Image: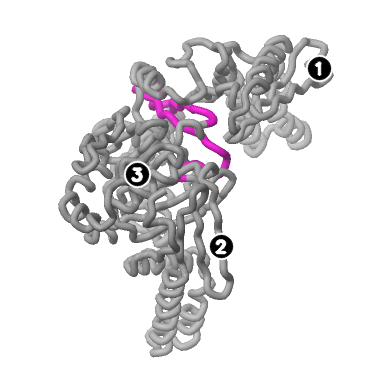
C-alpha cells in the first residue's frame, strides 16, 4: 500500500465545484427547494424583489451545503479496505473491502480540465449507487488510487515513486496524461525504477465506428431528453389553426386520404424520417460520450477510456464479469455489427445509473473472436459467436400466442365489428406476432463448460454464461411439460437469473449437472 494514502486525507478545495453542481442537479431533480422561488413569484410577481431574495437564499444554501460536504469528507486506504468519512449532522463512515470493489471509474468533467483534475468513482458489489466519489484528485494520485483499488494484490509500479516528485511529474506530463485518458497507450517507464507498464491495447474505435454505433443502437432516451422540453413549449391548438397546418391537412385529404396505399407510403416515410431524426441525436451522443474509444488490458483488468465533453476511464477486473452479452439490433443486423456488454453483479454495472454496462461498440464477428481470444482471465473459454442454436419447444408460444386475441374476440361477440373492436384485433394480432418472433429467436447451445442463450425479436442477442459463475440452478416442470418431457431451466448468477424455457428435460439436466459439478470443485469467490 502506498504510504501517502495510509492517513486520513481531505479532498482539494476545487471539489467544492463538483459538490455545488451535484447539489444543484439534486435540487432541480427533486424540486422541493424551488418551492420558495415559485411560491414567491406566484404571490408577488416574478419581477418582485422577494424573488431575487429567494433565489439568492437557495443559491447560498446550495453553496454552504457544498462547502460542508467538502470540509467533512475524509478518505483513507487501509491494507484491505478503503475508508470514507463524511457528514456533519448525520455522519457516515464507509469501509469498503478491496475484494468487493467491482468498478473504479476515472472521470474528468469539463470544469476540471483547466486544472488537470479528475473524479475517482468507486462501486462495490451489491450497491445501487456510487459508494465513494473522490472529486478534484490530480491525475497521478488518481492513477495510484485506481491501481490500488482494482488490483490490490498486484505489485504497483507507482508505489516506488517518491511522492515529493509528484508536482514536477504532473507539470511535465500533462499532455501525456490527457492523451492516456483519451485512450493512447502508455509504454513509458519510470527512470528511477525502470519498471514498465503491462498495458495491452484490445480495441480502438474512431469517429466512423462510433457514428455507426449511434445509428444502429438508436434509442428514444436521447430524443426524450432533448426534444421533450422543446415540444412542451408549443401550443399545439394554435399551431393547428395556422394557415400552413390547414393547407397541409387540405393537401392530405385531397391527395393522400383518397387511397389506402398512399396512406401506408406516407406513414412509412414519416416513421423512417422520425427514426433518422433519432439517429442523428443518437450518433451525436455516441461520439460525444465515447470518442475516441479505447479498450485496453492491464494484467487482469479491463480499462475503457474516451469522451469529449466529460473524459472517462473505467476499470473492470476480468474476474468480476458474470455474463457477456452480444447484442445486434435490427439496423445492426443489416450492418453486421454487434455491441458487446460486460455484465457484472446486478445493480453495480459501470454506468449503472443509466442502466448501461461496460460496452464495446461496432464489433464484427471477426473482431469479437479476436477480443475473446485476448481476454484470457475470464471464466468463459469460447472464442467465437455460435452460428446455430437449439430452439425452445413450440409449446411456449402455444400457451401464450392466443391470449392477446381473447379480449378482441369477447368484445366482438358483445359489440359486433366496430372501429374500436377492429383496433383491438389489430393490437391483438400485433402482440401475437411479437410473441411468435420472440419464440423463434429463443434458444440455447452448450459449448464445453460455457452455455449460450439466444434471445430477441427483430434484433437478436447472445448471452455467454460460464457455468463456473452459476450460483444456483432451478429446474421447473408444469404438468404439461412433464407429459412432454420438457422443463424450464433457471441459471442464477450474480448479474441476475438467465432463463431457458421449454427445453428438453435431458438437456436441462445436462446443463444443470455440469454447472453443479464445476462449481462443486471450485473454491473461488463467486463474484
Label 3: how many Cα within 10 Å (few below 14, some 14–19, many 20+): many
Report the side of 404 relative to 196 (left or right).
right
- Quadrant of residue 118 in the image? bottom left
The answer to whether residue 370 is above or below residue 193 is above
Front residue of 524 and 220: 524
Q: Residue under circle 3? A: 313
Q: Which residue is mark 2?
A: 93
Question: In x, y percent, where is residue 151?
Answer: 43, 39
Query: What secondary structure is marked by label 2?
Result: strand
**Along the line of sight, the residue nearer the viewer: 116 or 242:** 116
Circles 2 and 1, Cβ within 8 Å, touching? The answer is no
Task: Give the distance between the C-alpha atoms of the residues marked 2 and 1, in whole angstroms.
Answer: 54 Å
Q: Please tell me whether mark 1 sits on a helix, a strand or a loop.
A: helix
Identify the residue under disc 1.
480
Mark 3 and mark 2 in contact (Cβ < 8 Å)? no
From the top left corner, tell me how far across and down residue 328 is, in percent: 43, 25
Q: Residue visible at 68% across and 12% down?
A: 510
In the image, residue 246 lies at what x, y percent?
Answer: 37, 52
The reply to whether residue 241 is visible in this rendering is no
Rendered-image quadrant of the C terminus = top right
Cα separation, mark 3 vs mark 1, equals: 51 Å
Tell which of 424 and 240 is nearer to you: 424
- Which of discs 2 and 1 lies nearer the camera? The answer is 2
Image point 40% across, 60% down: which residue? 234
Q: How is the image coloured?
A: one colour
- Inspect the magenta stretch and tell me whether residue 239 lies in it: no
Q: Is residue 2 left or right of residue 123?
A: left
Q: Secondary structure at mark 3?
A: strand
- Magenta residues span 322-351
Q: Is residue 162 visible?
A: yes
Residue drawn at the location 48% of the way across and 65% of the way down: 26
Amino acid at each position: 500500500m502506498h504510504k501517502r494514502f495510509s492517513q486520513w486525507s481531505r479532498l482539494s478545495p476545487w471539489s467544492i465545484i463538483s459538490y455545488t453542481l451535484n447539489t444543484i442537479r439534486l435540487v432541480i431533480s427533486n424540486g422541493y427547494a424551488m418551492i420558495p422561488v415559485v411560491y414567491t413569484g406566484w404571490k408577488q410577481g416574478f419581477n418582485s424583489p422577494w424573488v431575487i431574495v429567494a433565489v439568492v437564499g437557495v443559491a447560498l444554501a446550495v453553496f454552504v451545503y457544498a462547502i460542508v460536504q467538502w470540509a467533512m469528507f475524509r478518505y483513507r486506504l487501509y491494507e484491505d479496505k478503503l475508508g470514507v468519512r463524511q457528514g456533519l449532522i448525520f455522519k457516515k463512515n464507509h469501509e469498503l473491502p478491496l475484494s468487493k470493489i467491482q468498478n473504479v471509474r476515472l472521470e474528468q468533467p469539463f470544469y476540471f480540465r483547466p486544472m488537470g483534475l479528475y473524479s475517482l468513482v468507486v462501486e462495490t458489489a451489491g450497491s445501487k449507487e456510487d459508494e465513494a466519489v473522490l472529486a478534484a484528485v490530480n491525475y497521478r494520485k488518481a492513477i495510484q488510487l485506481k491501481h490500488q483499488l482494482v488490483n490490490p494484490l498486484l505489485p504497483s509500479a507507482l508505489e516506488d515513486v517518491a511522492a515529493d516528485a509528484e508536482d514536477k511529474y504532473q507539470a511535465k506530463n500533462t499532455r501525456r496524461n490527457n492523451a492516456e485518458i483519451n485512450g493512447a497507450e502508455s509504454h513509458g517507464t519510470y527512470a528511477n525504477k525502470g519498471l514498465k507498464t503491462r498495458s495491452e491495447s484490445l480495441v480502438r474505435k474512431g469517429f466512423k465506428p462510433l457514428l455507426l454505433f449511434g445509428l444502429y443502437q438508436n434509442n428514444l432516451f436521447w430524443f426524450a431528453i432533448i426534444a421533450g422540453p422543446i415540444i412542451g413549449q408549443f401550443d399545439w391548438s394554435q399551431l393547428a389553426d395556422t394557415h400552413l397546418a390547414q393547407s397541409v391537412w387540405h393537401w392530405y385529404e385531397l391527395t393522400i386520404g383518397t387511397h389506402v396505399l398512399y396512406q401506408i407510403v406516407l406513414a412509412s416515410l414519416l416513421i423512417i424520417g422520425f427514426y433518422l431524426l433519432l439517429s442523428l441525436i443518437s450518433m451525436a451522443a455516441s461520439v460525444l460520450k465515447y470518442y475516441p474509444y479505447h479498450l485496453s488490458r492491464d494484467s487482469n483488468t479491463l480499462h475503457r477510456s474516451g469522451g469529449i465533453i466529460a473524459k472517462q476511464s473505467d476499470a473492470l477486473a476480468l474476474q468480476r464479469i458474470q455474463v457477456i452479452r452480444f447484442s445486434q439490433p435490427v439496423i445492426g443486423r443489416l450492418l453486421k455489427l454487434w455491441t458487446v456488454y460486460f455484465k457484472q453483479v446486478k445493480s453495480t454495472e459501470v454506468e449503472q445509473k443509466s442502466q448501461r454496462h461496460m460496452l464495446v461498440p461496432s464489433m464484427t464477428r471477426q473482431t469479437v473472436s479476436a477480443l475473446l481470444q485476448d481476454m484470457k482471465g475470464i471464466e468463459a473459454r469460447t472464442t467465437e459467436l455460435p452460428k446455430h442454436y437449439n430452439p425452445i419447444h413450440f409449446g411456449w408460444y402455444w400457451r401464450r400466442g392466443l391470449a392477446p386475441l381473447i379480449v378482441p374476440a369477447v368484445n366482438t361477440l358483445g359489440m359486433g365489428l366496430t372501429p374500436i373492436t377492429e383496433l383491438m384485433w389489430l393490437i391483438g394480432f400485433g402482440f401475437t406476432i411479437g410473441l411468435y418472433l420472440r419464440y423463434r429467436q429463443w434458444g440455447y447451445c452448450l459449448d464445453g463448460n460455457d452455455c449460450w442463450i439466444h434471445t430477441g425479436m427483430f434484433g437478436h442477442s447472445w448471452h455467454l454464461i460460464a457455468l463456473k459463475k452459476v450460483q444456483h440452478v432451478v429446474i421447473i416442470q408444469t404438468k404439461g411439460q412433464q407429459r412432454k418431457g420438457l422443463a424450464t431451466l433457471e441459471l442464477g448468477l450474480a448479474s441476475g437469473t438467465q432463463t431457458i424455457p421449454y427445453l428438453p428435460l435431458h438437456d436441462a439436466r445436462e446443463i444443470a449437472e455440469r454447472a453443479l459439478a464445476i462449481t462443486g470443485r471450485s473454491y473461488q469467490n463467486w463474484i
